[in-house]
Amino acid sequence: MDRFLQTFFNPVVMAQYTPDIIAGVWVTLQIAAAVIVAGILGGLALACLRSYRIRALNFFIICYADIFRALPPLVVILILYFGFPSIGIQLSGPMVLFIVLAATLAAFAEEIFWAGFSSVEKGQWEAGIATGLGFTRTLAYVALPQAVRLAIPPLVNRVLAITKMTALGSAIGVSEILSSATTAQSFSGSATPLTMSVVAYLVIFLPMVVVARWLESRTAWKKR
Amino acid sequence: MDIFIDQFFNIEIMRKSLPLLLTGLWMTLQLCSAVILLGLIGGLFVALGNMSERRWLRFISIAYTDLFRALPPLVLLIFIYAGLPFAGINISPFAAVVIAFLLNNSSYYAEVYRAGLISVAKGQWEAAQSTGLSPTQTLIHVVLPQAMRNVLPDLLSNTVEVVKLTSLASVISLSELLYNAGMARSVTYNASPLVLAALFYLVLLWPLVRLVSHFQRRLAA
Amino acid sequence: MANRPMLEIVSLEKRFGPNTILKKIDLKVAEGELVFVIGPSGSGKSTMLRCCNRLEEPTSGDIIVDGRNIMAGTRRDLDRMRLQIGMVFQGFHLYPHMTVLKNVTLAQRKALKRTKAEADARAIDMLEQVGMAHKADAYPGELSGGQQQRVAIARSLALDPKVMLFDEPTSALDPELVGSVLKVMKDLKSKGMTMVVVSHEMGFARETADRVVFMDGGVVVEQGTPDEIFGAPKAERTRAFLSRVSG
């Protein structure tokens, strides 16, 4: 038991590497926040555009959403990070991570918002249009608020899943929590920094899980 | 434009790296079947624990799902692969991947099952048991089939996520599809093998993604 | 002046693929007139109504509201014209995420560009007219079907329409709630509103309508005063339909 504690909860190692882990937490939080904002707004914009039912445009939106839902983000990250420099586009690790995760979230968010739009009753659109609001204002004031309400629980789950992927940054040298921890682990020869990273992630994401669970139970309740 | 095609869609390099990628694909498929199968079974037990009448069992299963929903799978994988040897436990990369993703996935599958089980009307339990079926028989023959049908899109989209997840095994040098593609890239200094791997994933997953959207639309209508 | 046409439907045709739903319909509705449209389901009466504000796009023909053709002009012209054509749906279609007051003020503010004070005052007036002012802060989900339909009527009236279209306004209501909605419609008629009503409430038609139109198979079979249509229908199809509904 003692050895176990020494290996995974060594106080000396903890004290030494806490600043590094905290620095990693900041990087993770900043990238996560940027991904959430850009991904949700991007997905919402795409879903709104899609509701105009312009055939050529919708073809591209659907292809985009399908591809980014089907591709593992790590594959895209590696292509951008290792492939783009040879065609003269240098992107930093954090930038690549941000672009790929935001694009992935946008793809999922588009589908979620679109499902929300599709389940707004046809009569709601007709009521808006019959009262002279026109398509765009009916979209903005009548359909959108109802779609967003439906979208929130699945969206929270998806946001959670994708912000967790900031850990993928460790594969391309972004100094977020996980790579700070693995670096510290190899310097210190102790597993303690890994434990610290686990704790750091739990501190960040456990509240989000609880919120997601609460939102789900609330909507499940309303359906009955 | 030429340089773009040369760097990302170089047919010659793709052809040379194809055998390596196919071995990787085979490993990916093995990983997928292990993780999906174990995840489906593990998830069912967690979900049943969640619906149990015993408080402590409910508590444990909720704590389990929340814990593994909060931890990034890569962190879990690194912790198991790089951390456990410190405690004198050495495991193969394959085992590490299966264990890490089993923990992660069973909690996701459990949530899907739970939603499905809740969706089946209570009268179904009562009706089945009044005809003399045991609780287990009721679960297997009456409730689960309905529950699975009700959450088919979620079950499917979760399975897509599992397949995508296996690409993380490349980080601990397990030679699956992405790892081998990365190897081929570093040997050729050309991103085409990675693009080819992406195409493999697309071929594998695009039909499933379409199917998910199709089901969701049908349920919404 | 009393005979000035407020709504004119001119050789209106509507096809869905190979099916012709409306076959060259002509109908004039005078200012202040209440025209009641009856007919079996599938006769095209709802489609005709929905063509009048182009919720359903006519295949050909003209819709003229107070002398202006809504088939001509740009999309923005159309939205402006729609403000003058009130529509009441079978399913109410109140916005569930807004209070009753908000439901009634939304188009006033966003389409008519009224100020909040103007729109609120107008909304309260209209809600009073339909007897719903006391529920201004409620959400649609908290109201009965009859109450929701009265709010929907107020929502249309607040835009000062020149003509009101009613698409089976009481068909989705429990029988005991039908009366309150019909009463509101009757008040409206007595205030001189031009109305076209598609409905099965024959008693209401007899009592309130100026003219009854019988449609079947996408054409107007016959029309006349309620006494003429209900008392002495000329066409065989009208007689068959009326004997079926009166049971």
Image: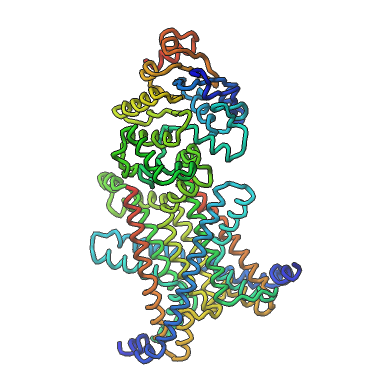
Instruction: Return the x and y of residue A49 as percentages of the image width and height.
Output: 56, 52
Q: Which residue appears at 35% of the width and 58% of the height?
A: A215
Above/below status of A214 relative to B181: above
The answer to which of B102 and C214 lies nearer the viewer is C214
Above/below status of C8 relative to A20: above
Q: Which residue appears at 48% of the width and 57% of the height?
A: B156
Q: Where, by quadrant of the figure, is residue C91 drawn?
A: top left
The answer to which of B180 and A92 lies nearer the viewer is A92
Instruction: Return the x and y of residue C26 as percentages of the image width and height.
Output: 57, 20
The answer to which of C172 and B213 lies nearer the viewer is C172
Asked whether, in this view, residue C19 is left or right of residue B161, the answer is: right
The answer to which of A207 and B214 lies nearer the viewer is A207
Instruction: Return the x and y of residue B119 as percentages of the image width and height.
Output: 35, 50
Q: Quadrant of the N terminus of chain A?
A: bottom left
Instruction: Return the x and y of residue B149 as percentages of the image width and height.
Output: 42, 50
Which residue lies most toward the right here? B2
Q: Where, by quadrant of the figure, is residue C12 drawn?
A: top right
Q: Which residue appears at 33% of the width and 55% of the height?
A: A218
